[in-house]
C-alpha cells in the first residue's frame, strides 16, 4: 500500500536468523492441503536510489545492504516485486534534456524513453539488480506505475471520461504505456515475464473523484495514486499492445497483470449487519473494478482486443489485501476475517471474464500486496515493553498464516507478495517480517518477528483450518456478487453499486 522509500535505506542489515514461533490456533479441524511454495512473494522497498545519501550515481539497495538477498532466499521466497521508478536526479536530467531539445514538457508523441529519464545509466543499474535476483533463481514481477514517469496527478488524469468527457487517453498514458513500457519489455524481457501495470489506481486521499463538486466549481485533485477508470483502461490497452509487439520481436511470452486495487475494511461489513453485502462489495474494490472494465469496452478499444485476440487485455487481476487489520484472534474465523474478501474479488473478476469470454475463462488473482501491521511504532518509546511485542507480533504472524493458507485453498493461481521485508517505523510501515531494535537511530541490528518464521513455513505443513468455514461444523462458504450501474442511495456519485453475499 505504501512504498518503502529512503527510510529503508537507513537500515543497517546485520546477520539474521529465523526462529520458530507459535501462535493461537482455531479449534481442531481436519487439515487441508498446504500452500504451494511458489505462492511466496516478497518486496523490500525501492531497488535503487540517487538521493544525497547515495555514494555516487545510482546505488542498489542490494549492494548497500547485502543481507537482503540472502534473507529473502532463506525465507524461501520465489518471487520479488520489482518497481521501475525513475529517480529524482534522472527525472531532473530528463527535464533539462527536454528543454534543451525544445520538447514540450508533456512530451506527447514526441519523446523517447531517454527524454523521460530512462537513460543508459538508469537502465544499467536496474539490470544489475535483476542479475542479482536471477543468480538466486528468484522470479520477478516488474511494476510499472506512477513512479515510472515524473508527472503530476493532473497530467495523469487529463482527458478522463468521468471528469473531462474524453476517452481516458492522454500524454502521460501514452508515454507510460507506449514509450517506456515497450522499452522495458525489450530490455528486460529475458529476465521478467510478468508485469504489473499500475499501483492502487483506485486510491484517492483528498477528494472523492466521483461525487458532485460543491458549488459547481473546478473539481479538486483526488490525491493519492488515483487515476480515473477510463485512464486506467487506456493504460491497460496500451500495455497489451506493447506486450504483443515485444513478443513479435522475440521476447518470451508476456503476462500483464492489472495494477493492484486496494481491498480494505472502509465500509461496515459485519456479517450480521443488513448492509454487509454492500460493504463487502465496496471493500473488495468492486466499484473501481467494474468501472474500469466497463470503461475499457466503452471507450478504450477492449472489444476489438477480444474480437481479434479472444482474450482480455490483462492476463491476471491485481489486488492488495489489507483487511481485518487489528482483528483479535484472527485465526478464530478464517472465512469472515479473510476468505470472503478474496473470494468476493475472485467472484467478480470471474464474472467479468465469463461475460466477455464465456464460461471457463477465469483469470488468476495476483495479490501483489498483502500485510498485517504491528503498530508498536505508534507507541511512545518510553512506553514500549516486551509485553507489547508479545501482544502485537503474534497477531501479524497469525494473519500471515491465515492469508496464505486461505489464498492457496481458494486456488487464486498466482503468487502472493508480502509487504514488506522490513519494518520502517519512521515511515509508519510496520508489516515487516523483521524489525529494528526499538529506540535506535540507525535501526540496527534487525530482529526477526514471529511472522518471519511463519512465512518460512508456508507450504511445509498443511493448514489447520478450512478457510471456507466460519467454524468446523459449518458448511463451506462461497460468495456471489450482484452488480448494478449507478449509485444505490450512497450519495457518493459512484458509478456502480453491488451486493456480495456470503453463502
Image (tube, grey):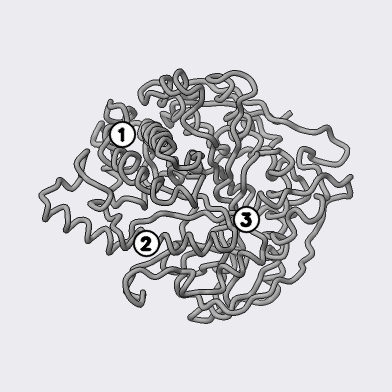
Q: Secondary structure at mark 1?
A: loop
- Foreground tag (1 vs 3): 3
State which quadrant residue 376 falls in. bottom right
The relative height of residue 446 versus residue 118 in the rendered view (above or below) is: below
For the residues labelled 2 and 1, the Cα–Cα distance comes to 46 Å
| Label 3 CA crowd tier, 10 Å (few <14, some 14–19, many 20+) | many
The relative height of residue 280 versus residue 431 in the rendered view (above or below) is: above
According to the picture, the residue beneath numbered tag 3 turns out to be: 78
Q: Nearer the viewer, residue 277 or 452?
A: 452
Q: Nearer the viewer, residue 438 or 5?
A: 5
Q: x and y percent of residue 241 in the render? A: 39, 33
Q: Nearer the viewer, residue 131 or 248?
A: 248
Residue pictured at 87% horizontal, 50% vertical: 27
According to the picture, the residue beneath numbered tag 2 turns out to be: 124
Q: Secondary structure at mark 3?
A: loop
- Foreground tag (2 vs 1): 2
Q: Is residue 378 visible?
A: no
> In the picture provided, is 189 more to the left or to the right than 160?
right
Q: Nearer the viewer, residue 83 or 376?
A: 83
For the residues labelled 3 and 2, the Cα–Cα distance comes to 24 Å
Indicate which disc, 3 or 2, sits on the residue closer to the N terminus.
3
| Label 1 CA crowd tier, 10 Å (few <14, some 14–19, many 20+) | few
According to the picture, the residue beneath numbered tag 1 turns out to be: 213
Q: Is there CB contact under 8 Å for labels 2 and 1?
A: no
> In the picture provided, is 329 more to the left or to the right than 384?
right
Amino acid at each position: 500500500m505504501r512504498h518503502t522509500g529512503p527510510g529503508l535505506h537507513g537500515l543497517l542489515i546485520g546477520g539474521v536468523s529465523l526462529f520458530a514461533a507459535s501462535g493461537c490456533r482455531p479449534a481442531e479441524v481436519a487439515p487441508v492441503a498446504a500452500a504451494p511454495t511458489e505462492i511466496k512473494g516478497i518486496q523490500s522497498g525501492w531497488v535503487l536510489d540517487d538521493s544525497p545519501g547515495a555514494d555516487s550515481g545510482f546505488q542498489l539497495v542490494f549492494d548497500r545492504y547485502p543481507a537482503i538477498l540472502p534473507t529473502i532466499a532463506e525465507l524461501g521466497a520465489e518471487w520479488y516485486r520489482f518497481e521501475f521508478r525513475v529517480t529524482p536526479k534522472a527525472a531532473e536530467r530528463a527535464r533539462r534534456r527536454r528543454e534543451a531539445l525544445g520538447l514540450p514538457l508533456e512530451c506527447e508523441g514526441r519523446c523517447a524513453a531517454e527524454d523521460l529519464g530512462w537513460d543508459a545509466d538508469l537502465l544499467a543499474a536496474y539490470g544489475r539488480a535483476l542479475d542479482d535476483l536471477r543468480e538466486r533463481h528468484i522470479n520477478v514481477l516488474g511494476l510499472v506505475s506512477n513512479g515510472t514517469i515524473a508527472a503530476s496527478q493532473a497530467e495523469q488524469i487529463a482527458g478522463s471520461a468521468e471528469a473531462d468527457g474524453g476517452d481516458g487517453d492522454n500524454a502521460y498514458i501514452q508515454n507510460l504505456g507506449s514509450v517506456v513500457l515497450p522499452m522495458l519489455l525489450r530490455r528486460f524481457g529475458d529476465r521478467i515475464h510478468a508485469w504489473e501495470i499500475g499501483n492502487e489506481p483506485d486510491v484517492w486521499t483528498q477528494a472523492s473523484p466521483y461525487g458532485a463538486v460543491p458549488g459547481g466549481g473546478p473539481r479538486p485533485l483526488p490525491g493519492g495514486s488515483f487515476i480515473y477508470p477510463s485512464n486506467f483502461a487506456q493504460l491497460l490497452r496500451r500495455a497489451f499492445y506493447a506486450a504483443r509487439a515485444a513478443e513479435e520481436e522475440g521476447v518470451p511470452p508476456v503476462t500483464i497483470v492489472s495494477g493492484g486495487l486496494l481491498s480494505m475494511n472502509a465500509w461496515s461489513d459485519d456479517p450480521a449487519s443488513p448492509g454487509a453485502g454492500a460493504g463487502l462489495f465496496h471493500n473488495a474494490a468492486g466499484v473501481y473494478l467494474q468501472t474500469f472494465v466497463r470503461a475499457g469496452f466503452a471507450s478504450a478499444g477492449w472489444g476489438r482486443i477480444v474480437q481479434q485476440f479472444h482474450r482480455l487485455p490483462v492476463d491476471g487481476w491485481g489486488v492488495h489485501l489489507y483487511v481485518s487489520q487489528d482483528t483479535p484472534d484472527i485465526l478464530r474465523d478464517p472465512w469472515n476475517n479473510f476468505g470472503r474478501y478474496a473470494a468476493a474479488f475472485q467472484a467478480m473478476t470471474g464474472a467479468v471474464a465469463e461475460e466477455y469470454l464465456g464460461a471457463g475463462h477465469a483469470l488468476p488473482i495476483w495479490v501483489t500486496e498483502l500485510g498485517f501491521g504491528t503498530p508498536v511504532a505508534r507507541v511512545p518509546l518510553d512506553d514500549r515493553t516486551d509485553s507489547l511485542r508479545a501482544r502485537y507480533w503474534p497477531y501479524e504472524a497469525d494473519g500471515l498464516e491465515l492469508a496464505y493458507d486461505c489464498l492457496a485453498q481458494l486456488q487464486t493461481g498466482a503468487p502472493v507478495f508480502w509487504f514488506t521485508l522490513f519494518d520502517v517505523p519512521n515511515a509508519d510501515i510496520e508489516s515487516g517480517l523483521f524489525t529494528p531494535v526499538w529506540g535506535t537511530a540507525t535501526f540496527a541490528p534487525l530482529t526477526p518477528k514471529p511472522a518471519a518464521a511463519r512465512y518460512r513455513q508456508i507450504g511445509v505443513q498443511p493448514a489447520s483450518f478450512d478457510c471456507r468455514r466460519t467454524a468446523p461444523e459449518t458448511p463451506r462458504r462461497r460468495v456471489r456478487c450482484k452488480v448494478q450501474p449507478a449509485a444505490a442511495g450512497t450519495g457518493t456519485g459512484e458509478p456502480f453499486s453491488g451486493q456480495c453475499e456470503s453463502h
